[in-house]
């Protein structure tokens, strides 16, 4: 089974480590052999992406080493230029 967890930078608090801990805490060895958790860090700030990856490696070294847990992030060029997006459905620039 593959489980994808998207995450973005939050101003106040991140729940990523707690979420991963909850998912990984009670896994049996047989379950961990059939599981891949992919964390998608959906941010363009490479320093932030690196810090999330380092936090995951620090908190879950066994799971990263065994291949149960992976971190991915798309290239910053994958994202559109946010300053030129058109407003739709009456949303403010902040919501677009």
Image (spheres, rainbow, N blue to C red):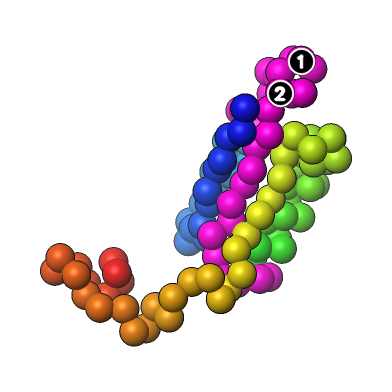
Q: Residue furthest left?
A: 90
- Give yes or no for residue 33 being in the magenta stretch: yes
Report the residue marked by disc 2.
Answer: 34
- Give yes or no for residue 69 being in the magenta stretch: no
Query: Which stretch appears magenta?
Result: 21-47
Q: Position of residue 11 (x, y in %)?
A: 48, 61
Residue name at image x 55 percent, y 65 percent: 43
Distance in Å between CA atoms under marks 1 and 2: 7 Å
Q: Position of residue 12 (x, y in %)?
A: 48, 56
In the foreground, 68 or 61: 68
Disc 1 packing (10 Å; few <14; some 14–19; many ≥20): few
Residue name at image x 70 percent, y 61 percent: 51
Q: Is 27 situated above or below 89?
A: above
Q: Position of residue 28 (x, y in %)?
A: 74, 15
Relative horizontal placement of residue 68, taking residue 62 as reference (left or right): left
Residue name at image x 59 percent, y 52 percent: 40
Disc 2 packing (10 Å; few <14; some 14–19; many ≥20): few
Relative horizontal placement of residue 13, taking residue 89 as reference (left or right): right
Report the residue marked by disc 1.
Answer: 30
Residue name at image x 79 percent, y 38 percent: 67
Q: Is 8 situated above or below 67?
A: below
Q: Is 73 situated above or below 79?
A: above
Which quarter of the image is occupied by the C terminus? bottom left
Q: Residue furthest bottom?
A: 84
Q: Is 62 situated above or below 28?
A: below
Count of numbered tags? 2
Q: Position of residue 70 (x, y in %)?
A: 71, 45
Give me the disc on residue 39: none
Element carrying mark 1: helix
Relative horizontal placement of residue 58, taking residue 39 as reference (left or right): right
Q: Are marks 1 and 2 in contact (CB under 8 Å)?
A: yes
Element carrying mark 2: loop
């Amino acid at each position: 089974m593959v489980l994808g967890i998207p995450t973005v930078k939050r101003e106040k608090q991140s729940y990523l480590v707690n979420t991963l801990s909850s998912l990984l805490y009670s896994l049996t060895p047989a379950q961990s052999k059939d599981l891949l958790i992919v964390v998608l860090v959906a941010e363009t700030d490479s320093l932030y992406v690196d810090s999330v990856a380092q936090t995951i490696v620090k908190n879950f070294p066994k799971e990263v080493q065994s291949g149960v847990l992976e971190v991915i992030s798309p290239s910053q060029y994958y994202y559109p230029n946010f300053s030129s997006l058109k407003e739709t459905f009456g949303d403010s620039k902040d919501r677009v």
